[in-house]
Image (spheres, helix red, strand yellow):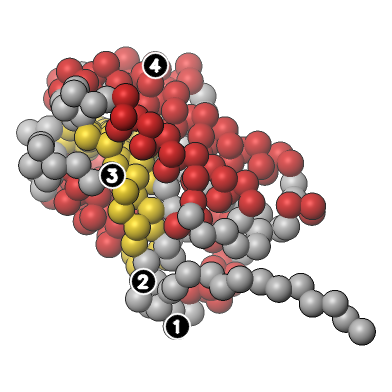
Amino acid sequence: MPTALVTGATSGIGAACAREFVAAGWHVVGTGRRVDRLDALRKELGERFCPAAFDVCDEDARDAALNALEGPFAQIDCLVNNAGLALGTSPAQEADIDQWKTMIDTNVVALVSLTRKLLPALIEAKGAIINLSSVAATYPYTGGNVYGGTKAFVRQFSLGLRSDLQGTGVRVTSIEPGMVETEFTVIRTGGNQQASDNLYAGSNPMTGEDIAETILWVATLPPHLNINTLELMPVSQSFAGFQVARQQD
C-alpha cells in the first residue's frame, strides 16, 4: 500500500488525515512538534503510523527525521502539506511583525522547502502533492493580512507546481477550506478558548474529519485525474461583503 507524509499531524486536519489514511490501508508518516501527541497517534493507529517529531521550520531536524525513515515509510507517495498557522487578528498597522514572519516561515518557506526535498521521490512514485490553502487566499477579511497572503502563495505555488510537473504523472491539488473547528483559532488568539468557542458557536462549521475525508478522496482518485483547486465552506458561511468607510459629519 502507498505511504502518505502528513505535516502538522498532532491535531485538527492533520491528525484526522492520519486516521483516515491509515483506516484506508495506507502507511502514514505524521510530523509535528508535540511528541506526546505523535506517540498517542502511534498507540492508536498501530504499525501503519510512523511518528516523525520535528519543527517544519528546522530543516536539519526535518532532514534527519526523513533520512531515518525505513521500510514502507521510506518511499513517500503522497505529500500532504497541512502544517500551518495564523497568528493575531490585528489590522496590518497594529500587527506584530514577528507573528508575520512566523506565518511566512511556517506557511510558505517550510512548505516549499519540504516539497522541493521530496519532489524527486514523488516524481519517481508518480505521486500526489496536496497543499492546504484557505478561502483566505481568495476572500480578504480584516485582520487576515499576512495569513491570507501566505495562503494565496500556497494556492499559486500549487498551480505553478502543476505546470512544472506536467508529464511526470505527479498530481497537485490546493485544498481551500473555509470555517473548520480545530485548534486554529485558539492558536491564533494566543490560547483564548473562549474566542474560539464564540467564533464557532451556532455556526455548524466543518470539522477536521470533513477535510481529511476530502483529502483522502483526492489522493485516491484514478491517476489520470487531477483536482487543481478545491474550495469548501460550511453551508452557514458565505463570502465576505464589501466594506465602506463613511465620512462622519
**Picture coordinates of residue 153 (x, y %)?**
49, 39
Residue drawn at point x = 32 percent, y = 48 percent: 229
224 sits left or right of 5 in the view = left
Q: Name the residue that disc number 1 marks.
A: 202
SS for dot 4: helix
Tell me the residue that label 2 is attached to. Answer: 234
Q: Earlier in the sequence, mark 2 or mark 3?
A: 3
Judged from the image, the secondary structure of the residue bearing numbered disc 1 is loop
For marks 2 and 3, give the one nearer the viewer.
3
Which residue bears the numbered disc 4?
A: 64
Q: Inspect the image, locate mark 3, and give the three-letter code of the amino acid beneath it.
A: Asn
Q: Amino acid at mark 1?
A: Gly
Which quarter of the rendered picture does the N terminus lie within? top left
Q: Which mark is residue 148?
A: none
User: Real-space Cα distance between discs 2 and 4?
Assistant: 39 Å
Q: Point out the tag, 1 or 4, that comes first from the N-terminus.
A: 4
Classify 10 Å Cα crowding around label 4: few (below 14), some (14-19), many (20 and above). few
Q: Quadrant of residue 194?
A: bottom right
Q: Mark 1 near mark 4, Cβ–Cβ under 8 Å?
A: no
Give the quarter of the image for residue 18: top left
Q: Earlier in the sequence, mark 2 or mark 4?
A: 4
Q: Earlier in the sequence, mark 3 or mark 4?
A: 4
Which residue is under mark 3?
Answer: 228
